[in-house]
């Protein structure tokens, strides 16, 4: 796992301990429960997931949606430096706390690299992971570990993964690592950097806390749920949690349901809803872990809405739903935020997308001096 030096000039731990009034004296609690701080953070991003997309789980999922398990709900305004964001600027707002231009990956509006929460946490000795159903070089995951001026620079993003702080990653994007486009075999570089790389299946004989793991299971994006992707996303989430549990160190993990967005762009309700339900199953894994652990903050949100999706009546029949779409692109409706665990109360209210970064930092008791 990460051997980064624990101290960093950029980062100071707040010397403040919050007193926890909800814990009765004498009850057994861990240090972070006593201080009310999150030891671990799981951030789940449903790309393109507006309120209607979330609502679809309540009409189309056969079991109760895991969304229902969150005690705190808020709303974010998702604009980038222009009114309607893309996924790159949206994820960069979450990862760095800065509004940037559409296409920006971990850089501010002047293309200057900004330290991400994953990097800040790693500098403090946290372990970290990224999981996506897109290529792992795609805008959302990339914005947590890479810094490039344009989201299209997939090979450069892949190369930055090698020297990044990431300890565990899973998703697609093999073609950007195999050297076919720029002659540099990034898979070999990952192996030299102590990654155990698997390009065929999400399987490890026995997870070891001293190793780093990478799964690149498709040339580009992972298959759609409609094309039998199976439980890749919930299983990868569970595997990451099992892996991080081998260490006493805190961890930060970003899990993206990437293709909710693609179903919205395609104005394909079956595609959208199947991806949304899969994402909800990954949320279930995170919440199960957090409930047992007691020190883990789980935050679920989206970068923006896609498709202008609406749960409208099927041909005027108010007892039947057939979703409609108003655009093949993104919309700028306010986006829901769900939070569970230490610091979750910070996530209520209506605020900017950059507030996700600020609140995660506050919940973990970390302050950035950048
Ligand atoms: Zn999109």
Image (cartoon, helix red, strand yellow):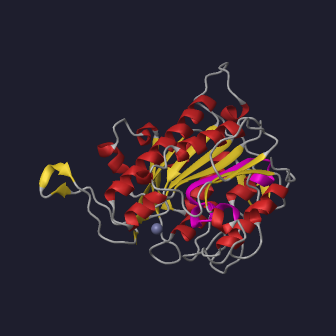
The answer to whether residue 216 is visible is yes
- The residue nearer to you, when weighing 299 against 267, is 267
- The reply, left or right, for residue 93 in relation to residue 15 is left
- The residue nearer to you, when weighing 305 against 131, is 131
> Which residue is rendered at x = 46% and y = 40% of the image?
70
- The reply, left or right, for residue 59 in relation to residue 117 is left
- The reply, left or right, for residue 366 in relation to residue 78 is right
314 up-or-down from 109: above or below: above
- The residue nearer to you, when weighing 201 against 237, is 201
Q: Position of residue 119 (x, y in %)?
A: 74, 58
> Which residue is rendered at x = 44% and y = 63% of the image?
262
> Which residue is rendered at x = 38% and y = 63% of the image?
264
- What residue occupies the far bottom of the structure in this picture? 110
Q: Position of residue 257 (x, y in %)?
A: 50, 54
Q: Position of residue 96 (x, y in %)?
A: 65, 64
**Stretch of the chain drawn in magenta:** 122-146
- The residue nearer to you, when weighing 119 against 98, is 119
Q: Position of residue 80 (x, y in %)?
A: 52, 73
Q: Is residue 340 magenta?
A: no
The answer to whether residue 147 is visible is no
């Amino acid at each position: 796992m990460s051997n980064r030096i624990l101290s960093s000039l950029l980062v100071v731990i707040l010397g403040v301990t919050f007193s926890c009034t909800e814990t009765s004296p004498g009850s057994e609690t861990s240090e972070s429960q006593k201080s009310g701080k999150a030891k671990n953070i799981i951030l789940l991003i449903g790309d393109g997931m507006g309120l209607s997309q979330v609502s679809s789980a309540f009409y189309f999922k056969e079991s109760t949606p895991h969304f229902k398990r969150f005690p705190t709900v808020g709303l974010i305004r998702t604009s980038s430096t222009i009114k309607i964001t893309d996924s790159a600027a949206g994820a960069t707002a979450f990862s760095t706390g800065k509004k940037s231009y559409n296409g920006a990956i971990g850089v501010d509006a002047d293309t200057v690299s900004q330290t991400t929460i994953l990097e800040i946490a790693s500098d403090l000795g946290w372990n970290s992971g990224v999981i996506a159903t897109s290529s792992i070089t795609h805008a959302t995951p990339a914005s947590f570990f890479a810094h490039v001026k344009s989201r299209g620079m997939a090979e450069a993003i892949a190369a930055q993964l090698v020297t990044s702080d990431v300890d565990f990653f899973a998703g697609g994007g093999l073609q950007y690592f195999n050297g076919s486009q720029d002659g540099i075999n990034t898979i070999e570089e990952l192996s030299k950097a102590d990654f155990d790389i698997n390009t065929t299946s999400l399987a490890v004989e026995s997870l070891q806390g001293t190793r780093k793991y990478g799964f690149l299971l498709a040339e580009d994006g992972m298959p759609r749920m409609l094309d039998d992707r199976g439980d890749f996303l919930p299983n990868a989430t569970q595997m990451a949690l099992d892996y991080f549990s081998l260490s006493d160190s805190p961890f930060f993990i970003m899990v993206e349901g990437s293709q909710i967005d693609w179903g919205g762009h395609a104005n394909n309700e079956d595609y959208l809803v199947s991806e949304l339900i899969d994402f909800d199953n990954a949320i279930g894994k995170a919440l199960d872990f957090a409930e047992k652990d007691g020190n883990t903050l789980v935050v679920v949100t989206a970068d923006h809405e896609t498709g202008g999706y609406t749960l409208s009546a099927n041909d005027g029949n108010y007892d039947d739903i057939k979703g409609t779409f108003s655009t093949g692109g993104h919309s700028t409706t306010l986006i829901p935020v769900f939070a569970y665990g230490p610091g979750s109360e910070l996530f209520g209210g209506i605020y900017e997308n950059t507030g996700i970064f600020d609140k995660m930092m506050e919940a973990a008791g970390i302050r950035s001096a950048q």
